[in-house]
Image (cartoon, rainbow, N blue to C red):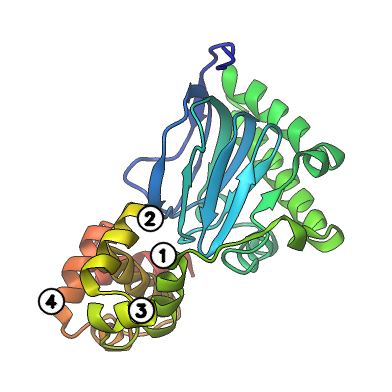
Amino acid sequence: MVIIMDIKIVKHGNHAVNSDTDGYMYNFNTSMGSDFSLHIHTCFEFIHIIHGKLLYKVENSEYMLSDGDFIMTKPDEFHSFSFPEECEYQREFLHIYPGFLKNYPEILESLQTRKSGYFNRIPADVVEKYGINRIFRDIEKCCAEPVEETDFMMLTYTLQLAVKIKQILRSETPENQRIPAQSKANVICSYIDAHFMEDISLEEIAKSVFMSPSHTSRLFKQETGMTIKSYLTMRRIRKAKNMIMEGHKTMSVFVDCGFSDYSTFYRAFMKIVGMSPDKFKQQQTKKI
């Protein structure tokens, strides 16, 4: 039975579409649950589930979410979600780009240091205990009727949210919330994560799960919504971005990331990041 929720849409932010680094975006909406294939963001994503039941995958972990739960991902953390049955899905999410917190490096660090694929979910009772739901109510009111001071207010709410998350990760025991994910696709991801800097082939990946290359490709696409090649390329580009941010030269990182030549690396970087490696490096230099 589908429960009909009140249709309410709130959307506000100062994030520019052509920017991957600065601003925020808040969205409250209702829709029929539909699956979303594996993807990454360049922002921190915080989602508060109002109503619905869904399976959320982050890296090699799986979380079953329901009313009141909270899920978070950081930039470049692979994630996807699906619905075990038809339902009306009501949620609110907040996207925070790193530049929005540039004057608060300790807050950025606290959000970044969480290990990818771990402690992404905060259960509903803990959300209520620490007042995360109340922070989101304030955010909703702030974005529903924006005024001149809204951006500043959103900054204060974001800082409050980050502090609460830090307290939860320090004081609670989120290890028990994580569902071990042992599907073939996750085994494939783990193998790629360990070997993406090498010149690995589909045949080698298939051997790691004891299947034929064609069967491996079909299964991975079915479970993740993307091809093995796409996942491998995204892993390599994420490594390249990190190396560039660490100060490595753009003309040398492609070898350490598993690319056979610079032109292939350049095309992949442009497609995924939306700019050339040199332009990305220039943007990172400006932040220092």
Distance of label 1 from label 3 (alpha carbons)? 12 Å
Residue type, label 1? Ala
Total numbered circles: 4
Residue type, label 4? Ser
Residue 146 seen: no
The tag on residue 185 is 1
Q: Are marks 1 and 2 in contact (CB under 8 Å)?
A: yes
Q: Quadrant of residue 119?
A: bottom right
Mark 3, mark 2: which one is toward the viewer? Answer: 3
Mark 3, mark 4: which one is toward the viewer? Answer: 3
The crowd level at tag 4 (other Cα within 10 Å; few <14, some 14-19, many 20+) is few
At horizontal 72% and vertical 45% (from top left) the residue drawn is 161
- Give the residue number, with chain letter if any, for mark 4: 263
- Give the residue number, with chain letter if any, for mark 3: 210
Q: Quadrant of residue 263?
A: bottom left
Residue type, label 2? Thr
Residue type, label 3? Phe
